[in-house]
Amino acid sequence: MKALRVLSLVVAGLLTSGFQQPTPVPVETGTKAAAKYFEPKKVAGSTTSATDSNTHYLAVYIGNHLSSDSYLWGSPGESDNGKFIGGLAYRFDEWINSGDKIVKIDFASYEFAGGQKATKMSILYAISFPDASSRFPFYFGAGIGPGVFFKQLPGESSVSLDYQLFLGLRFMNLFQSFGLFVEAGFRNHVMMLSDGQFNGSYLTTGAVFTF
């Protein structure tokens, strides 16, 4: 009888444990739970754009003046004094999430009647729109800064105030970080210590590297 009683207690215990309610799993509520539904979905195979707001680029270019006029600089009535142009442009920051902050370093040569020549380096602070991260091919902008003549006409100022307006077409990252661009615009300067002035239009082309 004692063995039968023990057996009945064991069977009753097993049956009772089989019908126990499962432990409830806590359910997240509130803002944390809701936030999961608003997280951006990851698309398979997607990659980050090679050009974003933190991208820097360096453009190297050469070109020539298309036409130019000088006033009180060289002989009266001279035109087409502007010749070779070369330089680089460095994009170092973004401007209000819409444009690029750029430093342009230009080298230009000029020729005048009688074989006289002048050469100048310009350092300009420029802003262009839209920013490079938009990947839009067309851009436009303006720049201003000082110019320093390495070679100048006698009696003329060796320092000028330079300003530019430009419009361009660029194709970034054609081959990994390498791209191409073409740019046209106006390159003007006024002498700081004399009365000379120069107005010219230009066309340049070159390569652009992102990093």
Image (tube, helix red, strand yellow):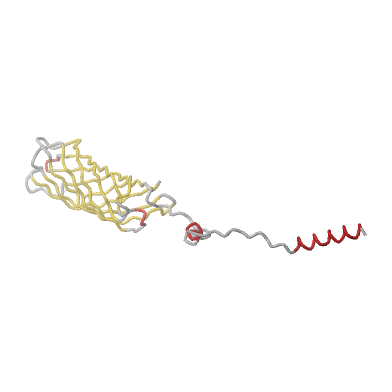
**In the drawing, does residue 50 fall left or right of residue 71?**
right
Q: Residue at x 6, y 46 (%)?
A: 76
Q: Nearer the viewer, residue 40 or 107?
A: 40
Q: Quadrant of residue 170?
A: bottom left
**In the drawing, does residue 119 fall left or right of residue 33?**
left
Q: Position of residue 31 (x, y in %)?
A: 47, 58
Q: Position of residue 5 (x, y in %)?
A: 88, 59
Q: Residue at x 12, y 47 (%)?
A: 70
Q: Residue at x 83, y 61 (%)?
A: 11
Q: Position of residue 50 (x, y in %)?
A: 43, 52
Q: Nearer the viewer, residue 18 or 204?
A: 18
Total tally of numbered discs in the picture: 0
View extreme (right): residue: 1
**In the drawing, does residue 61 fall left or right of residue 111?**
right
**In the drawing, does residue 58 fall left or right of residue 119?**
right
* Image position of 7 with respect to 56: above or below: below
View extreme (left): residue: 76
Q: Position of residue 195 (x, y in %)?
A: 8, 42
Q: Quadrant of the N terminus?
A: bottom right
